[in-house]
């Protein structure tokens, strides 16, 4: 009696089992990266110098999978390696690199935060270049798959990291629901494409895209309904750190201008120092008031 049901389920899930499994692996890797990143700043007492151990390990996984994607001759397997490389690349390049810490030997690896909204320009350029390289076969499909997943995550993160400050609070539930609905339909379309194709490579690529669209469905129906606690707590501190660094840079520039004028290396007119000093004094006076 159960055999017809088993046959039917086998008929349905066998063609799309690979994409679903690949998407679930992506969720597992994401969960792994989140849990292993807790000691950096989300713990009650962040572990000092934890980034000096975490970054090399994640970098080793990233470069190891990327190397395998470059040398793997079986295309479907190479796409998997490229997918895994992108999943491990994001914690290193997109998170830890620009994360400011209060204590430790290295408090910040890079001052460039690629998740800022202005990064959209480079994301668009990246998508165009990927399209050209994939269509012209300038790069192996496995390497293109790496850039595909990484650009998907980057595009996704640009919205996720900025929605709390850019979207009106009263519109968040409606936008979240629409995002979840649209990407739910895209996820269904991906499953249909995977079900209809006989290409293992295409099924694999569909699985990597399913990981992204399914993640967006989860975020749209959950976190994006309200402002992010994580953003308010951690990104607020990050912005304060950036303001302090800019203030230090501004003070040093004022010192350099004064030094160059006193030594005769430049005039006030050349540096525009007089007008700038007056505006600087006015801003200081306003702050004191």
Image (tube, rainbow, N blue to C red):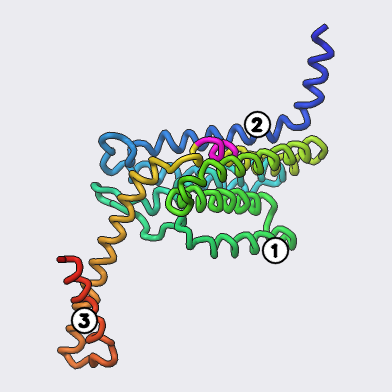
Query: What secondary structure is marked by label 2?
Result: helix
> Residues in magenta?
217-222
The answer to if 27 sits in the magenta stretch is: no
In this figure, which residue is indicated by the disc labeled 3?
A: 278
Secondary structure at numbered mark 3: helix
Quarter of the figure that contains the C terminus: bottom left
**Residue 219 located within the stretch drawn in magenta:** yes
Residue 98 vs 32, above or below: the answer is below
Q: Residues within 10 Å of mark 2 (few under 14, many from 20)?
A: some
Looking at the picture, how far across and down is residue 200, in whole percent? 76, 39
When asked about the image quadrant of residue 49, the answer is top left
User: Which numbered tag is attached to residue 21?
Assistant: 2
Residue 121 % position (x, y): 54, 65
Asked whether 30 or 143 is in front, the reply is: 30
Q: Can you name the residue that lies furthest to the front here?
A: 170
- Judging from the image, what secondary structure is the residue with disc 1 in? helix
- Which mark is first along the chain, 1 or 2? 2
Give the residue pinned by disc 1: 132
Q: Are marks 3 and 2 in contact (CB under 8 Å)?
A: no
The reply to whether residue 85 is in sight is: no
Q: Is residue 171 left or right of residue 193?
A: left
Q: Is residue 218 left or right of residue 205?
A: left
């Amino acid at each position: 009696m159960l055999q017809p049901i088993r046959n039917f389920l086998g008929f349905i899930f066998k063609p799309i089992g690979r994409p679903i499994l690949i998407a679930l692996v992506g969720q597992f890797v994401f969960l792994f990266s989140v849990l292993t990143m807790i000691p950096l700043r989300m713990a009650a007492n962040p572990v000092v110098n934890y980034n000096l151990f975490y970054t090399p390990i994640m970098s080793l996984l990233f470069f190891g999978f990327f190397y395998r994607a470059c040398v793997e001759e079986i295309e479907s397997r190479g796409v998997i390696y490229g997918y895994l490389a992108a999943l491990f690349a994001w914690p290193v390049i997109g998170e830890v690199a620009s994360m400011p810490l209060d204590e430790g030997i290295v408090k910040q690896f890079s001052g460039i935060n690629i998740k800022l909204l202005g990064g959209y320009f480079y994301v668009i350029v990246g998508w165009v270049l990927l399209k050209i390289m994939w269509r012209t076969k300038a790069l192996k499909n496995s390497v293109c798959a790496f850039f595909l997943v990484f650009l998907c995550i980057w595009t996704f993160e640009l919205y996720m990291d900025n929605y709390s400050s850019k979207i009106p609070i009263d519109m968040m539930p409606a936008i979240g629901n629409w995002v979840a609905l649209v990407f739910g339909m895209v996820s269904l379309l991906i499953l249909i494409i995977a079900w209809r194709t006989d290409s293992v490579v295409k099924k694999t690529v569909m699985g990597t895209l399913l990981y992204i669209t399914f993640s967006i469905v989860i975020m749209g129906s959950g976190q994006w309904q309200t402002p992010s606690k994580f953003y308010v707590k951690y990104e607020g501190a990050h912005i304060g750190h950036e303001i302090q660094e800019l203030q230090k840079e501004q003070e040093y520039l004022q010192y350099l201008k004064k030094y160059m004028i006193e030594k005769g290396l430049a005039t006030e007119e050349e540096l525009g120092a007089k007008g700038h000093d007056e505006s600087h004094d006015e801003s200081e006076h306003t702050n004191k008031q």
